[in-house]
Amino acid sequence: MIKARGLARRFETRQGPVEAVRGVDLDVAEGELVGFLGPNGAGKSTTLRMLTTLLTPTAGEALVAGCDLLTDPAGVRERIGYVGQQPGGGQDQRVGEELELQGRFHGLSRHESRRRAAGLLERLDLTGLEKRLVATLSGGQQRRLDIAMGLIHRPALVFLDEPSTGLDPQSRRNLWEHIRGLGVTVFLTTHYLDEADFLCDRVLVIDHGAIVAEGSPDELKNRVSGDLVVLGTPQAARIAPRFDGATVDGDVVSFRVPDGDRALPSLLRSLDADGVELRSVQVHRPTLDDVFLTMTGRSLREDDRAA
């Protein structure tokens, strides 16, 4: 569905040229749900805008939904759906009318637009809202309407740009379930590590305009050396040297061990035999943020907040 080679974009600024994207190679297979993860300024939005024909690459080439990005941008637009960060529905339009209008923009007949709109309303749990003004919908309902608008012409590939930003946790989870059931190839950008972990078959991590990691969430997390064990004990400083790479923060010592759940019983027996007083014990599986930290030396969450 997507094959990009050497995709790059340079911006000219008063301070000089900025290499926003530096020769990205990526492949997305039919039916995949691929997440594009990275901090603000990493090149996510620029790459997405290039792949959706909204921005012309400075260098490189790509096939998107079977069409050449540079020589046939109109063909690309006919075959993809795009859901941006901002609500796409006209706030003073009725839900059913807005979907029908979107279908007409794509060349569908009035009858076919209404038929497809009815199916999408049911599929995305919006049935009964046809006569409601878009402005009266909840945040989650508006995002599902945006997705319906992006699917009205039955594209083979849908781009979702941070689809759950601004939603409350319950609405985000509900939206995730609907995205998982779309049945088309999906390429989405996100700031949320848990969103990428829950939704994506495969994750691409971009930093400073280049892909720094790629794989399924589990494959990426397996690159981190073991599970994180966190012990609360007044003897934290004394026991830290027995664990490779241990860090101490007051009465807390943290370190990584392979397969933490299996290692923990014997570890606790050993500490008890040495008279170590334990106040708390936690075992954490690696996260996608740990992957980013391993690959770049900094936290994705911290980098996002700073940006």
Image (tube, rainbow, N blue to C red):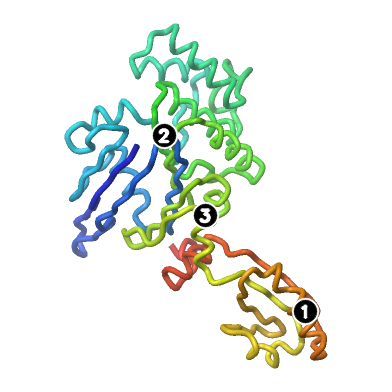
Residue pictured at 42% horizontal, 8% vertical: 110
Residue pictured at 49% horizontal, 66% vertical: 223
Q: Nearer the viewer, residue 80 or 216?
A: 216
User: Which residue is label 2 attached to?
Assistant: 158
Looking at the image, residue 304 lies above or below residue 297: above
Looking at the image, residue 199 lies above or below residue 11: above
Quarter assignment of residue 158 = top left
Looking at this view, name the residue that lies furthest to the bottom.
238
The Cα–Cα distance between marks 1 and 2, rounded to whole angstroms, is 49 Å
Give the amino acid at mark 3: Pro
Quarter assignment of residue 274 = bottom right
Give the amino acid at mark 2: Val
Q: Earlier in the sequence, mark 1 or mark 3?
A: 3
Please identify the quadrant where the C terminus is shown. bottom left
Alpha-carbon neighbours of circle 2 within 10 Å: few (<14), some, or many (≥20)? Answer: many
Numbered tag placed on residue 198 in the rendering: none
The kind of secondary structure element at disc 2 is strand
| Residue 30, image x, y percentages | 40, 36
User: Which residue is label 1 attached to?
Assistant: 268
Numbered tag placed on residue 217 in the rendering: 3
Q: Nearer the viewer, residue 257 or 212?
A: 257
| Residue 261, image x, y percentages | 70, 67
The number of discs equals 3
Residue pictured at 36% horizontal, 48% vertical: 45
Q: Nearer the viewer, residue 246 or 300?
A: 246
The kind of secondary structure element at disc 3 is helix
Looking at this view, name the residue that lies furthest to the top.
111
Q: Earlier in the sequence, mark 3 or mark 2?
A: 2
The Cα–Cα distance between marks 1 and 3, rounded to whole angstroms, is 30 Å
Q: Earlier in the sequence, mark 1 or mark 2?
A: 2
Give the amino acid at mark 1: Leu
